[in-house]
Image (cartoon, grey):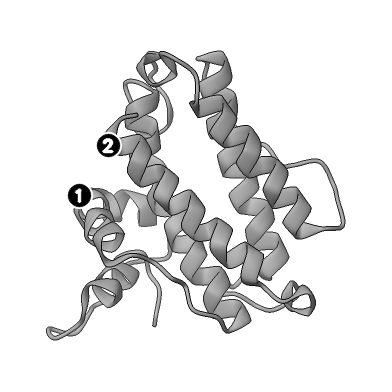
Amino acid sequence: MSQNLRIFTQAVYAFDAVVHRTPADAWESPTPCSEWNAQQLLEHQCAVLNGVATIAQTGQMARPTPSPEGGDPVATWNACRNKLLSSLDTQGVLNQKGPFWFDSADVDELVAAVTWDPATHAWDLATAVGIDHGLDPALIETLIRRVAPVANMLSETGRTAPALESSPDADQLHIYLAMVGREA
């Protein structure tokens, strides 16, 4: 397992932990992503990760792919997570050559490039439903290093809200959240 895959898996499991602690009656809660409620945010996350899984399975470019319609967000997420992790747990999968999203040369670079998405949405979902995000400070530091060089591109292409100013005394989490256009 590469370091990129370890960090990506940590971000996926951060989202997973929030999903599994989300109260059943909270899936209609508004999120920091103004166009989505909690269930729609989960569906977005599944679409992105289903796209990553398809790329890993086929070695070909793929688009984000919505999960099949289902009424149970946790079951939808579990199926998505299992498909994703299974697709990445194959000898040689990380070395498949692209280019893939974000001009990633291979699947290993792809998972590094998209790590910010499940981590950020773990915070979004936790905020929406009023529970702790549980994001590890070391993960946040890695996200800052990875997102800082591409923050403008993420915003300009509509993947994140425009970056916000963070206060000079902000902690790492608040610096990262400002980078991806979140007010904490």
Q: Position of residue 183 (x, y in %)?
A: 39, 80
Q: Residue furthest left?
A: 168
Q: Position of residue 55 (x, y in %)?
A: 53, 23
Crowd tier of the residue under label 1, counting other residues whose Cα lies within 10 Å: few below 14, some 14–19, many 20 or above:
few
Q: Amino acid at mark 2?
A: Gln
* SS type, badge 1: helix
Q: Residue 3: which numbered mark, if any?
A: 2
Residue 116 shows up from this direction: yes
Up-down relation of residue 120 to residue 178 (above or below):
above
Q: Which residue is mark 1?
A: 149
Instruction: Determine whether, in the image, residue 169 is placed left or right of residue 74.
Output: left
Which is nearer the eye, 87 or 30?
Answer: 87
Crowd tier of the residue under label 2, counting other residues whose Cα lies within 10 Å: few below 14, some 14–19, many 20 or above:
few
Q: Residue 111: which numbered mark, if any?
A: none
Work out how far the residue at label 2 is from the one at label 1, CA to CA, in angstroms. Answer: 19 Å
Q: Amino acid at mark 1?
A: Pro
Location of the N terminus (image quadrant): top left
* SS type, badge 2: helix
Which is nearer the eye, 180 or 77?
Answer: 77
Instruction: Determine whether, in the image, residue 121 is placed left or right of residue 155.
Output: right
Q: Position of residue 112 (x, y in %)?
A: 33, 39
Residue in the picture at 27% in, 67% down: 137
Q: Nearer the viewer, mark 2 or mark 1?
A: 2
